Amino acid sequence: MTKTIEDLIPDYLRGLPMYVPGRPIEDVERELKIVAIKVASNENPLGPSPMAMEAVKGALGEANRYPDGGTHRLREKLAKLHGVHEDEIFVGLGSSELIDLAARVLLRSGKSGVTSEGSYAPFSIAIRANNAELRLAPLREFTFDLRAIAAKVTGDTAVIYLANPNNPTGTAFGHAEFAELLARVPESVLVVLDEAYVHYADRVDMPRSMELTRERKNLLVLRTFSKVYGLAGLRMGYGVGPRALVTAMNKLRTPFNVSGLGQVAAVAALNDAEHVRRSIEANRAERNGLHEGLTALGLRPVRSETNFIFIEIGPEANAISEELLRLGVIVRPLGWMGMAEALRVSVGTAEENGKLLNALALVCERRAGKSELASR
Ligand code: PLP
């Protein structure tokens, strides 16, 4: 019998889950004919850096030209900022591209990759997409357990993925713990430290990650322009790590991976210290208010170091998220990530958080009413 394309797709890809993004506002508004807010994808509710927007407007006229395929201006700026060499920086389509490329460079059948349960799904997907064995350590109190991670490492392990702060739980580990992990893990294992939310962390002992990239030959630190800089739609991220890895990732990436508009926006956003400061301060104030509001509703939010909050809400998490959707509030149920009893909500503007809390209060009230009726 002749084979079809479907037959040619390897088994390890057939079984792979697809990353489920938060639902776009327009989608929900069209389907339900309502006005909605989205607090599902941990975006910056203050918008893009104004300086980045200006820079993009100025660069639009160059859109007929291919961008700088070597991202020289941006890498030069980042090298100065972090005190590293330009050759140790890879610029990608969000940090997502780097998560994928690191795995493509280092993993294959016979190798293993380690991450944690209850962490960012693309880590597991990247490991499995390369036919490597996925090893998951358990979370401890919603936080990466770095000793459990180290215990999963064997001779065939090539990559460890960590998110700090973690998505979706919002917790963070400190410098001493991370330094201990690095000391335990052989230099032949790449440690990917994804710091997408690092700007929002209040913990004072966050890992001094860039300093560690200068000391360790097996550390790749990921950063993104999607969060505090407000440029998620332009898909810009970068990593700082070993030259050999950066060189190999450059060979695998597509020739002009990041756009010219993305590059000028990123350079301008790095100069826009005021937008970063405002974004962090607004997030801190709103995050505290949201945490208190959720607690007052009798819910159990996990204290967050990020721009979102994780709530263990019970077996009805999915149904609650559907009810919220109908009230015009898009949150993120986490069942597809193996956390069927949890929701994640992003910290929005004061108005958005108010709408979220009102909607949640209504849903909780309705549910309490229903269970009272049922018990009569
Ligand atoms: N890493 C973590 C932990 C995230 O939560 C996200 C996005 O939500 C990303 C990476 C992806 O970011 P980017 O937009 O840079 O691809």
Image (cartoon, grey):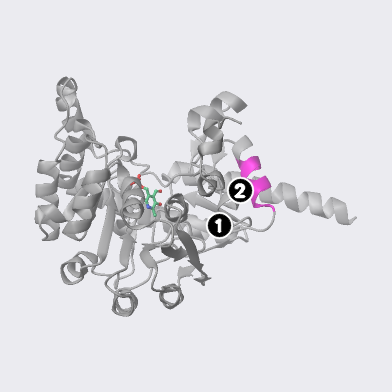
Seen in the picture, residue 35 relative to 196 is either above or below; the reply is above
Residue 68 in the image: state x and y as whole percent: 14, 34
- Kindly state the secondary structure of the residue where label 1 is placed: helix
Range drawn in magenta: 316-324
Residue 69: which quarter of the image?
top left
Say left or right for 270 vs 121.
Answer: left
Seen in the picture, residue 197 relative to 58 is either above or below; the reply is below
Viewer-nearest residue: 109 or 318: 109
Residue drawn at point x = 15 percent, y = 68 percent: 214
Q: Which mark is residue 155?
A: none
Residue drawn at point x = 34 percent, y = 76 percent: 181
User: At label 2, which amino acid type do we have?
Assistant: Leu
Task: Return the residue at label 1.
Answer: 294
Can you name the residue that lies furthest to the front here? 1
Residue 270 in the image: state x and y as whole percent: 17, 47
Mark 1: few/some/many CA within 10 Å (<14, 14-19, 20+):
some
Q: CA distance from mark 1 to mark 2?
A: 9 Å
Say left or right for 289 vs 164.
Answer: right
Residue 326: which quarter of the image?
top right
Seen in the picture, residue 163 relative to 374 is either above or below; the reply is below
Does the magenta portion include 289? no
Q: Are marks 1 and 2 in contact (CB under 8 Å)?
A: yes
- Kindly state the secondary structure of the residue where label 2 is placed: helix
- Whether residue 87 is visible here, answered yes or no, is yes
Residue drawn at point x = 56 percent, y = 61 percent: 295
